[in-house]
Image (tube, helix red, strand yellow):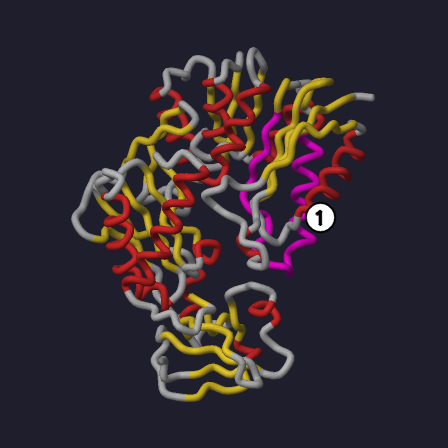
């Protein structure tokens, strides 16, 4: 069906055979047939056994990203529509869809593309050449499927400005797809209102993956004092204020993020109880400790301290220090909420690091709950890169 065939070396393709979707450049014995990067190719094992169809890009270390393992499949508009429809139906089953991630790359069997829905606006991030060629079809199918549920898409904005595009030999890009619209979009999540800046906000504009985790914090904050570190645009802090916290301080190093967080507080009429400040959290926490400050709840939601295996050691030091500092600011029988959004900081290593921080702070931890990312960011077993967010709530005891 497809003219080009990628043949694996003997003993290679372990990720693919375990259920993953990637073929790496050093796993390929040879490529038969002519092709252009971005084309659909067949993947065969060394003995000719059919492995699947995917798109090829020899400029990338991930040379082939698999789209299907079924030999009779044809990657056409009908195929794409089924993938999109399956993704949307899954979201309707599992999460509030007013704002959610509709497509999560490999975990939705559409590798290399992310589509977030913020109210009636779609934000797309395309990170692989082959999926970039399929992007117009994916978006058309998405609009069609949403229209069947009486959802009209007001506009689409592309945020394909991540550095990893350059690994695919692609230029970074951001801009409107189709007609222009106001890129400041109001959404509601867990009862809290936000302005999302889909043009200039981080990633696609807002971190939807913590939706259920933010909701879980609402249970423990009523009439409490709360310190929210790395607050970004104020989401955890605002959930605390919405749930009746007595006093909340959100901290972030970005002036722009803090400005947006204050705007979000006013949007929810929480500005009297939820305050924000610009500061480096690593500098601020020791100062608060010196001043003898204590909080009922401390929330730590830092950016990824590592984006590669080579920097894990430094990341562990960062996570250990921030958790140790945070623990020292929690009152006896108060709560620590702590997260890691780095795929390379695996759950066991993160738990070990928190345990070491608790030992260093002379605190005992009683686990309230452990969570991962919201179900609109599904974890596809065997596609390890889809599992990245770890989230704990602990009660902190001075015993």
Which residue corresponds to the image point at 34% horizontal and 44% vertical from the top-left? Answer: 200
Describe residue 230's horizontal placement relative to residue 179 as left or right: right
Viewer-closest of 383 and 200: 383
Which residue corresponds to the image point at 54% horizontal and 50% vertical from the top-left? Answer: 379
Q: Is residue 141 above or below residue 295?
A: below
Residue at numbered disc 1: 349
Q: Is residue 219 above or below residue 109?
A: above
Q: Is residue 17 above or below residue 370?
A: below
Describe residue 249's horizontal placement relative to residue 72 as left or right: right
- Disc 1 element: helix
Residue 382: x %, y % from top left: 59, 59
Residue 109: x %, y % from top left: 44, 59
Q: Residues within 10 Å of mark 1 (few under 14, many from 20)?
A: few
Which residue corresponds to the image point at 47% horizontal and 74% vertical from the top-left? Answer: 63
User: Magenta region's main secondary structure?
Assistant: helix
Res. 336 visible in picture: yes
Magenta segment range? 298-326
Q: Quadrant of the N terminus?
A: bottom left
């Amino acid at each position: 069906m497809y003219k080009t065939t990628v043949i694996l070396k003997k003993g290679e393709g372990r990720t693919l055979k375990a259920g993953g979707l990637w073929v790496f450049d050093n796993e390929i014995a040879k490529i038969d047939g002519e092709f252009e990067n971005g084309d659909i190719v067949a993947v065969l094992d060394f003995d000719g056994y059919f492995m699947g169809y995917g798109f090829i890009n020899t400029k990338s270390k991930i040379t082939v990203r698999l789209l299907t393992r079924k030999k009779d499949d044809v990657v056409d508009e009908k195929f794409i529509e089924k993938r999109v429809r399956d993704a949307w139906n899954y979201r309707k089953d599992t999460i509030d869809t007013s704002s959610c991630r509709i497509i999560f790359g490999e975990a939705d069997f559409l590798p290399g593309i992310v589509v977030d829905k913020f109210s009636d606006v779609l934000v797309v991030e395309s990170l692989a050449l082959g999926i970039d060629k399929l992007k117009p079809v994916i978006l058309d199918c998405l609009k069609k499927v949403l229209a069947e549920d009486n959802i009209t898409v007001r506009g689409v904005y592309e945020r394909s400005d991540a550095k990893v595009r350059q690994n695919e030999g692609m230029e970074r890009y951001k801009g409107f797809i189709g007609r222009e619209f106001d890129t400041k979009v109001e959404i509601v999540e867990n009862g809290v209102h936000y302005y999302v800046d889909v043009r200039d906000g981080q990633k696609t504009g807002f971190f939807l993956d913590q939706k259920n985790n933010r909701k879980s914090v609402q249970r423990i904050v009523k009439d409490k004092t709360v310190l929210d570190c790395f607050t970004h645009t104020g989401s955890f802090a605002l959930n605390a204020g919405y749930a009746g916290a007595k006093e909340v301080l959100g901290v972030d190093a970005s002036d722009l993020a803090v400005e947006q967080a204050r705007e979000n507080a006013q949007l929810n009429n929480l500005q009297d109880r939820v305050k924000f400040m610009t500061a480096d959290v690593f500098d601020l926490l020791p100062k608060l400790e010196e001043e003898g400050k204590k909080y009922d709840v401390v929330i730590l939601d830092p950016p990824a301290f590592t984006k590669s295996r080579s920097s894990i050691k430094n990341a562990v030091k960062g996570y250990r220090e921030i958790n140790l500092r945070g623990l020292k600011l929690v009152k006896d029988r108060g709560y620590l909420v702590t997260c890691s959004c780095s795929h390379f900081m695996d759950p066991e290593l993160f738990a070990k690091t928190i345990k070491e921080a608790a030992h260093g702070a002379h605190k005992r931890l009683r686990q309230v709950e452990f969570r991962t990312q919201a179900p609109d960011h599904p974890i596809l077993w065997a596609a390890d890169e889809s599992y990245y967010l770890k989230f704990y709530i602990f009660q902190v005891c001075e015993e």
